[in-house]
Amino acid sequence: MATNIITGHLIEYTQNQCKLHNIPLTQGVTSGFFWNRNAGEWEAIYTDMLVVNDKKILLVPKGIVSYSKNYAPDKYYNHFVLNFLQHEHLRINGALIQHRKDGTPFVTKDSLKELHPQSKDFLRRFTQEHPEVLEQFKNETENDSLLNMEIDDLDITNIIPQLIQQLGDIPPGTQSASAFHNLIIGILEIIFYPHLINPVKEHEIHDGRKRIDICFDNAARGGIFY
């Protein structure tokens, strides 16, 4: 479900990665339906896609993939949505308020659950009306990006000396600019992952009139980039 919703973003990521690694794309391939947040509806387009053995391939950045099970609707509903509604009923002196023996007002989550049972429809409507609660949920929920060793047995410490060697072997001059450019992207990705992810080579700005040599997405959850 998540893949279908973000297919448009994954297509763009795949195109950028294929351009970065000189992998050919097939033109005029239907994207399949993906969610257009601005239009509030599903749409499909014809675009350049990675096709292998007649199958469309979407690449997914490891920085957004996690084994974490914390992103669950139950946790969102019970610990964030209901907490928010408790405070709201207390704030407006709502009908669900009860009082303790000392007179302290309170609202039970059971009474809120009767009024607002958990469902996809309710959570969708609630989130549209209170996006700040979803933002709080995301900020407070731990989501560690996948590490290289969780994908394969690649040892970064063995790669670093090779990169240093390759960097020293690149001769100066414009003829080696492209090789230097590609190697620097790989080096920067190793240095800054998982804070900076999704490198884009020659990112176009101002309708293509200018280009940024290397562009990253800022995914930092702490440190100087946060």
Image: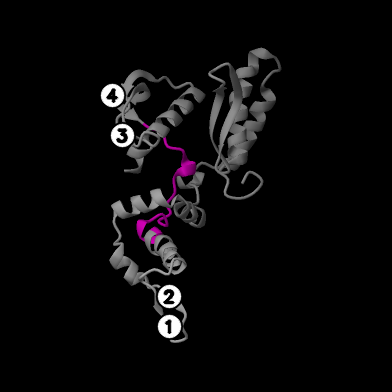
Q: Quadrant of residue 93?
A: bottom left
First reached walking from the N terminus: tag 3 or tag 4: 3
Q: Is residue 63 on the magenta stretch?
A: yes
Q: Which residue occupies the extreme top position in the image?
A: 175
| Residue 152 percent across, percent down from the top left | 46, 43
Residue 54's disc is 4
Q: CB atoms at circles 1 and 2 under 8 Å apart?
A: yes
Q: Could you classify mark 3 by the number of other residues whose Cα lies within 10 Å: few (under 14), some (14-19), or many (20 or more)?
A: few
Depicted 215 relative to depicted 62: above or below:
above
- Nearer to us of marks 1 and 4 is 1
Q: Which residue is mark 3?
A: 42
Q: Does the magenta stretch mainly form a helix, a strand or a loop?
A: loop
- Nearer to us of marks 3 and 4 is 3
Q: Could you classify mark 4 by the number of other residues whose Cα lies within 10 Å: few (under 14), some (14-19), or many (20 or more)?
A: few
Q: Which residue is mark 1?
A: 100
- For the point 70% across and 14% down, which residue is it? 173
First reached walking from the N terminus: tag 2 or tag 3: 3
Q: Secondary structure at mark 2?
A: strand
Q: Which residue is mark 2?
A: 106
| Residue 136 percent across, percent down from the top left | 49, 55
- For the point 56% across and 22% down, which residue is it? 205
Relative depth, front residue between 88 and 191? 88
- For the point 58% across and 45% down, which residue is it? 220
- For the point 40% across and 50% down, which residue is it? 129
The range drawn in magenta is 58-76
Q: Amino acid at mark 4?
A: Asp
Q: Quadrant of the N terminus?
A: top left
Q: CA distance from mark 3 to mark 1?
A: 49 Å
Q: Secondary structure at mark 3?
A: strand
Q: CB atoms at circles 3 and 4 under 8 Å apart?
A: no
